[in-house]
Image (spheres, rainbow, N blue to C red):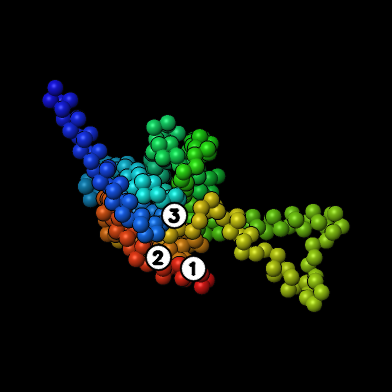
Amino acid sequence: MEKTSGNTATRLFWSIVSFLRRCLFLVISIRPIPRHIAFIMDGNRRFAKKRKMMDGDGHRIGFLALMSMLKYCYELGVTYVTVYAFSIDNFKRNPEEVQSLMDLMQEKIEGLIKEESIVNRYGVRVHFIGNLKLLSEPVRSAAERAMAATANNSRGVLSICIAYTSTDEIVHAVQESCEEKLDEISAMNASGAGYGLIKLGGNEEDERVKIVKLTDIEKHMYMAVAPDPDVLIRTSGETRLSNFLLWQSAFCYLYSPSVLWPEIGFRHFVWAVLKFQSNYFYLERKRKQS
């Protein structure tokens, strides 16, 4: 009887907390809210080491912190969320640690497919972003199943950057753009139409420069599935982007709380949004000037 009463009281408490949080979000949303928030989840290993935990425990607790951040984002009305889960450079770590992280990722990715998962509860479509060929077959297969299972969700988008670096993304986009243009040129030459490289008043060298345009490269970026981020949050007090969204973050607000990723909480999220709002018109002006 006492246990049942305790459970009821706990559920009532968290219902009240959820109600108050939603009320606060209603007040915050009077002003412009971020459309896209990106996270660099820094400090999982340091968190575990500081608390003398087992290897991998920091990342498991960090996953719970991610679930909380996703819940806050989608409750506030943020449409796009992007997280930096695993860099290509992380493959250089100890093989046992890399394998442990891959196993954890596979476990958590499989969890996204479940009907009661946070992405299905909020109607979120999942994209895995990066050079997925570098992943082990079980992890890549789990990622493909998760993307297929959430393909019809339309209320939000979660992009998980795994086996990703921004420089790899840019090189990939340039290569894809050039290959696309070469295919177009070959097709037009084969039809006898030509590609119009030489125009009246111009010369071949000038026109070749214009073949691949900015829009072509942006179309082939891994992150073409989302607009540029409005806010980028990196924990642990580090003020580096670490090869993450370099192309897309020119005009986003950067926020770097000193807490380690597993320690990030509601107050940090709210503060990041409020700081974005206070800088919103300045950032918008800079975007338009560019």
Identified at 27% across, 59% down, the residue is 258
Q: Position of residue 25 (x, y in %)?
A: 32, 51
Instruction: Pick out the residue farthest to the top.
Output: 1
Q: At numbered mark 1, what does the secondary structure look like: helix, strand or loop?
A: helix
Frontmost of labels 3 and 2 is 2
Task: Report which residue position mark 1 lands on.
Answer: 287
Dot 2 corresponds to which residue? Answer: 280
Tell me if residue 255 comes above or below residue 285 in the rendering: above
Contact between labelled residues 2 and 3, with CB atoms less than 8 Å apart: no
Q: How many angstroms separate mark 3 from mark 2 (CA)?
A: 13 Å
Q: Quadrant of residue 10?
A: top left
| Front residue of 157 and 11 | 11
What residue type is disc 1 on? Arg
At which x and y percent is residue 211?
70, 65
- Counting other residues with Cα less than 10 Å from the Cα at mark 2, is it few (<14), some (14-19), or many (20 or more)? some
Point out the residue furthest to the left here: 2
Q: Position of residue 72 (x, y in %)?
A: 34, 47
Q: Looking at the picture, does residue 281 appear above or below residue 117?
A: below
Residue 36 in view of the camera: yes
Under mark 3, the amino acid is His
Residue 130, given in percent of the width and then of the height, sits at 51, 50
203 to the left or right of 137 = right
Tell me: 44 left or right of 281. Answer: left
Residues under numbered marks 2 and 1 in contact, where contact means CB atoms less than 8 Å apart: no
Kind of residue at badge 2? Tyr
Report the residue marked by disc 3.
Answer: 36
> Does 129 sit left or right of 192 as displayed?
left
Q: Are marks 3 and 1 in contact (CB under 8 Å)?
A: no
Instruction: Give the residue displayed 60% in from the left and 56% down from the top.
Output: 219
**At 49% from the left edge and 58% from the top edge, which residue is drawn?**
228
Q: Nearer the viewer, residue 86 or 282?
A: 282
Q: Quadrant of the N terminus?
A: top left
